[in-house]
Image (cartoon, rainbow, N blue to C red):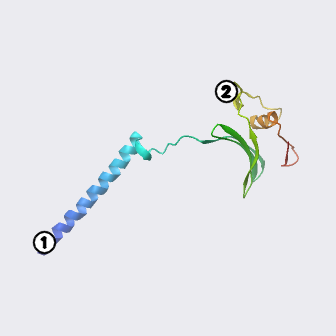
């Protein structure tokens, strides 16, 4: 009777391995074919458009959330909203804005919306 018990336990173990193999194969196939909730791709509801570093752990970022643009301040321990910006027309996207002399495109966007940074400090003036 011990031979029968040993064979049953081996069959059960092999059945378990077969089931785990099938589950892994289905997961891999669904992920590869991008079917169902395993695709990993979600609609981009938030997008980082650009950043400007002000200090080692501080900066300003331009973020698009659901077709709205926000200028946010990023600190070492917090994130705060500085301003809500009107999204420009498609023809005047940030890529088409020429950088300010000695600056970058993000700094030009800030100047165009009425925010400009002082080069001596990290405070913004409106």
Which residue lies at the image location 38% right of the left edge and 44% below the top edge? Answer: 30
Decide: is 33 above or below 15: above
User: Which residue is outermost to the bottom?
Assistant: 2
- The quadrant of the rendering that contains the C terminus is top right
Which residue lies at the image location 79% right of the left edge and 34% below the top edge? Answer: 108
Depth check, mark 2 against mark 1: the one in front is: 2
Query: In the rendering, which numbered label is found on residue 99?
Result: none
The residue identified by callout 1 is 3
**Residue 22, position in %: x, y?**
30, 52
Label 1 crowd bin: few (<14), some (14–19), many (20+), radius 10 Å: few
The residue identified by callout 2 is 90
Which residue lies at the image location 28% right of the left edge and 56% below the top edge? Answer: 19
In the rendered structure, the answer to whether residue 56 lies left or right of residue 64 reads right
In the rendered structure, the answer to whether residue 33 lies left or right of residue 113 reads left
Which residue lies at the image location 72% right of the left edge and 56% below the top edge? Answer: 78
- The quadrant of the rendering that contains the N terminus is bottom left
In the rendered structure, the answer to whether residue 17 lies left or right of residue 108 reads left
Decide: is 105 above or below 77: above
């Amino acid at each position: 009777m011990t031979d029968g018990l040993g064979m049953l336990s081996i069959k059960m173990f092999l059945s378990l391995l077969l089931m785990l193999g099938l589950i892994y194969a289905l997961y891999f196939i669904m992920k590869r074919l991008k079917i169902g909730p395993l695709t990993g791709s979600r609609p981009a509801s938030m997008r980082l458009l650009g950043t400007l570093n002000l200090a080692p752990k501080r900066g300003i970022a331009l973020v698009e959330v659901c077709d709205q643009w926000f200028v946010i301040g990023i600190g070492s321990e917090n994130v705060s909203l500085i301003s809500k910006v009107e999204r420009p027309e498609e023809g005047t996207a940030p890529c088409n804005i020429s950088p300010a002399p000695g600056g970058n495109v993000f700094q030009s966007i800030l100047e165009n919306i009425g925010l400009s940074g002082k080069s001596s400090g990290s405070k913004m003036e409106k």
